[in-house]
Structures are given as structure tokens and as C-alpha cells.
Image: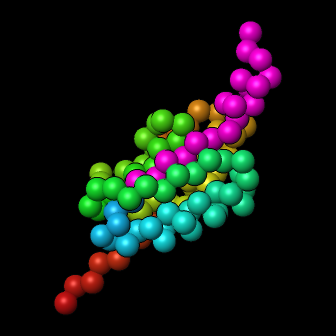
């Protein structure tokens, strides 16, 4: 049987975001972190500069979104909701929603 401390620890989501520094995605990570903290104040969020083109979201060691695979940033509201669900004891689920890809054709 798990102790109360172990149960409480499971309820605190850990969110790791690897972002592309060259792409200037650091601000996106900070915006996402602020949104998560507003809905789930106890969440631990780590923004880490990483690979070119990346914006990888990992919740409790599970990759839930990869910009390297989708070529778009995730839907922030969906990420916020998944983190909130994890704080209630649910498993992290894959993020399906994306922000529109800004593409300019000249």
C-alpha cells in the first residue's frame, strides 16, 4: 500500500519541454508554463533548450507531443488540460491538437 506522501507525489505532474533556442521558442515554453501554472499550480515545469526545430512535451516521462514529428506547435489549451488531468491521477495522454502552421508563400 502506498503512503499518502507517495500518492501526493504522483499527483504533482512533471512537465519537461525541450525547445529550439535557434527558433526562439523559449518564449513559447514560458507562455505554456504560465498557462499550466494557472490551472495546475503545483506542476513542475522545466523548459530546456534543445534540438533545432524542437518543441517536445514530456509529462511524467511520457512524450505526449513532438514538434519534430508534427512540424507544428501543440495546442496549449490541450496541454494544460492533460497536465490538469494528470494532477488528478490520470495517465498522460497524447496531444492531438496543434497550432496553425504559419506558412508564407511568396
Any part of residue 70 in sight: no
The C terminus appears in which quarter of the rendering?
bottom left
Q: Is residue 90 left or right of residue 17?
A: right
Q: Is residue 65 left or right of residue 76?
A: left
For the view shown, which residue lies furthest in the bottom direction? Answer: 106
Q: Residue at x 41, y 68 (%)?
A: 25
Q: In this view, does 60 lie to the left or right of 103?
A: right
Q: Where is residue 65 in the image (x, y as percent from the top left)?
A: 43, 49
Q: Quadrant of residue 14?
A: top right
Q: What is the span of residues highlighted in magenta in the rendered image?
A: 1-18
For the view shown, which residue lies furthest in the left direction? Answer: 106
Q: Is residue 12 magenta?
A: yes
Q: In which quarter of the image is residue 26?
A: bottom left
Q: Is residue 43 left or right of residue 104?
A: right
Q: Where is residue 84 in the image (x, y as percent from the top left)?
A: 68, 47
Residue 83 against residue 34 in the figure, above or below: above
Amino acid at each position: 500500500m502506498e503512503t499518502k506522501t507517495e500518492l501526493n507525489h504522483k499527483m504533482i505532474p512533471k512537465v519537461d519541454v525541450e525547445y529550439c533556442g535557434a527558433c526562439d521558442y523559449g518564449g513559447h515554453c514560458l507562455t505554456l508554463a504560465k498557462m499550466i501554472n494557472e490551472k495546475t499550480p503545483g506542476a513542475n515545469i522545466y523548459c530546456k533548450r534543445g534540438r533545432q526545430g524542437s518543441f517536445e512535451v514530456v509529462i511524467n516521462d511520457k512524450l505526449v507531443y513532438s514538434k519534430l514529428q508534427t512540424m507544428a506547435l501543440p495546442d496549449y489549451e490541450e496541454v494544460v488540460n492533460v497536465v490538469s488531468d494528470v494532477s488528478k491521477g490520470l495517465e498522460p495522454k497524447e496531444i492531438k491538437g496543434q497550432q496553425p502552421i504559419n506558412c508564407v508563400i511568396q
